[in-house]
Image (cartoon, rainbow, N blue to C red):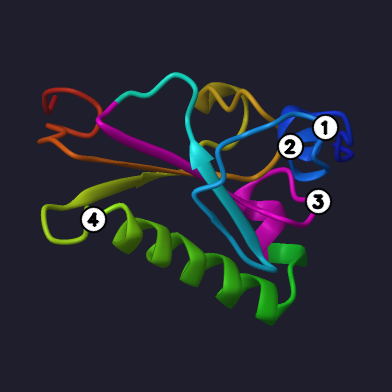
Amino acid sequence: MAYDDNNIFARILRGEIPCTRLYEDEFALAFPDIHPQAPTHILVIPKGKYISAADFNAKASAEELVGFYRAVSAVAKQAAVEESGYRLICNAGPHSHQDVPHYHIHILGGRPLGHLLGPPL
């Protein structure tokens, strides 16, 4: 699958669609999710053209990998969810409900989140 330069996150990165920038550096941009699922629900996206975690991990430079994951940690700290705890979610592909074909991580926190997928089977 080829990267779609017109996906919403690519357009946000180009400044075509506004967002509330909570964090930004040379590797990542973080902004609130427009449909929050927890009191803290922040998206962190790499600035490169990556479709999924597998794509990012296979193609990103070592500097991009380290920079992006450090940005994720910095955003969690800035959002004050480190001590109480938070969840990182990365959807990949249609079965996971990945809506935007640009790699991204959801940071969720600010309340007890319960079981990951519901009650254990």
Q: Which residues are magenta?
A: 38-57
What SS does tag 2 mark?
Answer: helix
Counting from the top left corner in percent of width and height, residue 43 is at: 50, 41
Q: Is residue 38 left or right of residue 59?
A: left
Q: Earlier in the sequence, mark 4 or mark 2?
A: 2
Amino acid found under the numbered disc labelled 2: Ile
1 and 3 marks in contact (CB < 8 Å): no
Please name the residue shown 82% across and 32% down the image. Answer: 16
Q: Please, what secondary structure does the residue beneath circle 4 have? A: loop
How far is disc 4 from disc 2 in space, using C-alphas? Answer: 25 Å
Mark 2 sits on what residue? 12
Q: Which residue is mark 1?
A: 16
Q: Is residue 94 above or below residue 2?
A: above
Q: CA distance from mark 3 to mark 2?
A: 13 Å
Q: Which residue is mark 4?
A: 80
Residue 76: x percent and y percent?
Answer: 33, 57
Q: Nearer the viewer, mark 1 or mark 3?
A: 1
Specify the quadrant of the image occupied by residue 5: top right
Tell me the tag on residue 49.
Answer: 3
Secondary structure, mark 1, is loop
